[in-house]
Image (cartoon, rainbow, N blue to C red):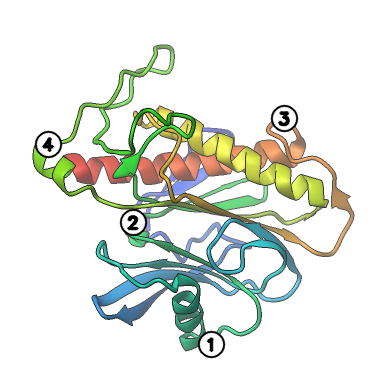
Amino acid sequence: MQVASGAAGSATALRCRVPIPHPDAALLRALLVQHEDASGTWPALLWRAGDGWQMISSAVLGGGTGPRTWVLNAQVGHGYTRLDPDRHLTEIAQRHGMTGRGVGLMTAARVTEGAFATDGGVEALVTAGIGVCGWAADPATPARDTVPTPPAPAATVLAPPAPAAAADRAMPVPGTINIVVALPVALSPAAMVNAVATATEAKVQALLDAGFDASGTPTDAVCVAAREAGEEVLFCGPRSEWGSRLARAVHTATLEAALRYRARRLS
């Protein structure tokens, strides 16, 4: 597997179709597994984190805060119709030997096009499907299926992406940006919340850098994992020691995943 230098600091991002196992992953050792449903066989990313982790997440399964021992990011078909995704994710995890409390995320994005990045001990794994995207505070404009223009130089303002072809607009491609982050330190409850905000800020910055006129998709999810043991870090904003590392790792991984998505849509 080829590893290339990232855009910020010591961050690195994997540049191959299957993002894991990654040689730089000391914490977030996700595995590529498979699961089946009525629509076929699909890949999923499974991190057997084990004991000693506190997580905060917006995921449909295991969301909120507390001890968690695994994280699953499962790809499903675009026509997914089950109304019990939490139960479905539990079933998938159990088939792969997972017990106890974990976090389950779901996406129609291609998880094999995800991207990994690390910065100063913080690790991030991001999968990105950005077919239906928009701005969070834009109630007058419906979510739209877009294909972005190539990113402009950093010193200029990005132009809005070109509209998708009529066929694409008629059948939007669903997707989700799922972000999983692992830190090798303990975070206070407030710092855990701050870490989610910092990861979200970095995601938006990466989308703009990738040429998307959007802050995300309507179904984005995030999971931040921190150690239970050790002295708690009190701050995780973007200018704090650990927050800045988290921001760079998430930005690098999100940018890489978004660029892969854009390249495939434009090919």
Q: Disc 3 marks which amino acid?
A: Arg
- At 25% across and 65% down in the image, what residue appears? 79
Q: Residues within 10 Å of mark 1 (few under 14, many from 20)?
A: few
Q: CA distance from mark 1 to mark 3?
A: 39 Å
Pick whichever, 233 or 132, lies toward us. 132
Q: Crowding at label 3, few (<14), some or many (≥20) Cα neighbours within 10 Å?
A: few
The spot of residue 130 in percent (x, y) is 34, 44
Which residue matches tag 1? 97
Task: State the residue position of label 3.
Answer: 239
Q: Are marks 1 and 3 in contact (CB under 8 Å)?
A: no
Judging depth in this view, the residue of 207 and 62 nearest the camera is 62
What's under tag 1, amino acid-wise? Gly
Whole-number angstrom distance, CA of label 2 to CA of label 4? 20 Å
Residue 240 image offset from top left, x and y in percent: 76, 34
Badge 2 amino acid: Ala
Q: Is residue 267 visible?
A: no
In terms of secondary structure, where does tag 4 sit?
loop
Label 3 or label 4, whichever comes before in sequence order: 4
Q: Classify mark 3: helix, strand or loop.
A: loop
The image quadrant of residue 20 is bottom left
Q: Is residue 239 visible?
A: yes
The circle drawn on residue 109 is: 2
Could you say which disc has been placed on residue 165 in the image? 4
For discs 3 and 2, the disc positioned in front in the rendered view: 2
